Amino acid sequence: MTSTPEETQGSVAPKPDEAATRTGYVTLVGRPNAGKSTLLNAFLDRPLSIVTSKAQTTWERVAAIDTRGDVQMIFLDTPGLLEPRDLLQRSMLATALEALREADIAVAVVDATSATESRLARLAATLDETAAPRVVAVNKADMARPGQIEAVMDWAVTEIGARAFPISALQATGLEDLRSALDELLPEGPFLFDPDDLATRPTRFFVAEFIRETVFQRYHQEIPYSVICRVNEFREGQDPVYIGVTLFAEKPSQKRILVGERGSAVRELGRASREKIEHFLGRRVYLDLWVKVLPGWRRRRTHLARLGFHVPEGDDAGRP
């Protein structure tokens, strides 16, 4: 279903007229809960990046491939820009800035209902990390009060010299004009990925993300932000597909809550997660969940590296 850049770039047959195609990386950046993941899913017309009502649900970048006709966009969904308070958040910020520097087009996603001068100023400073063309998606236009959309659009033109488009990612409105603008800005060149590919991450990454999304939906307070999922086994050659997953919590008390009395909570978590995974894979799944404690994993360099996060060196990971 998905493949890595190393696997796909060498396998794409050259087109008769490669100059007629456009392709490139479109990086979505913005504050937590601005609607970046919702916008990515709306562009793809499928739930590839997890979305919940809670802020800061995207922890690692998601690269989604959208090929239509002679245009291929690789959307990079990034963690929200924030003032990091622990090593995990520093890693998230570094990931967002790295994706911004790789961009062929930078799309600043702004929540029109909560944009303030100070937040827009910080976003403008972050956009200085890239020399790529900039576009502003003025999100939540369906909920904005009079004047809020216009204020962000004026800021886009006067402060960062960018075109701005009022949209509602949730309602999937206003996307046609935004997509047309992105089409025009993409550089000419051959496709970077096979047109049938949907993402650069392996399937097991999305399986873990669907489980983490379910944790965010079912739990409150510190639990969702203290749990990470990793797939240990993925046996596609059997029916149902066997998937073994470990959920790492920071504290024993969190593990007890996740497991529940006689395992009732983790069974319900597994049932709800399995439905999403089966819909994603189009196959029956046997989901085997295990909960373990990895003390303070959000703040320990060795734990984060073990879990696959890129951990920036020193104390200068950058600021939003």
Image: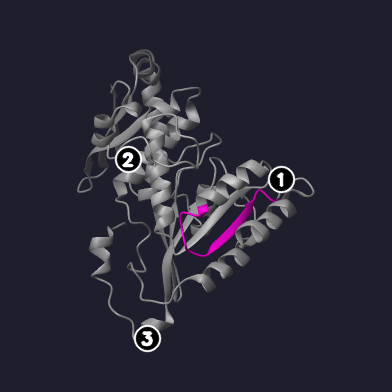
- In the displayed structure, would residue 263 be above or below residue 302? above
Q: Position of residue 182 (x, y in %)?
A: 53, 67
Q: Which residue is mark 2?
A: 312
Q: Position of residue 276 (x, y in %)?
A: 42, 42
Asked if marks 2 and 3 touch (Cβ < 8 Å), the reply is no
Q: Which residue is mark 3?
A: 17
**Quadrant hosting residue 166:** bottom right
- Alpha-carbon span between mark 3 and mark 1: 44 Å
- In the displayed structure, would residue 253 be above or below residue 298? above
- Front residue of 76/320: it is 320
Q: Residue at x 53, y 40 (%)?
A: 32
**Quadrant hosting residue 204:** top left
Secondary structure, mark 1, is: loop
Q: Which residue is mark 1?
A: 143
Q: Is residue 239 magenta?
A: no
Assign the N terminus to one quadrant of the image. Answer: bottom left
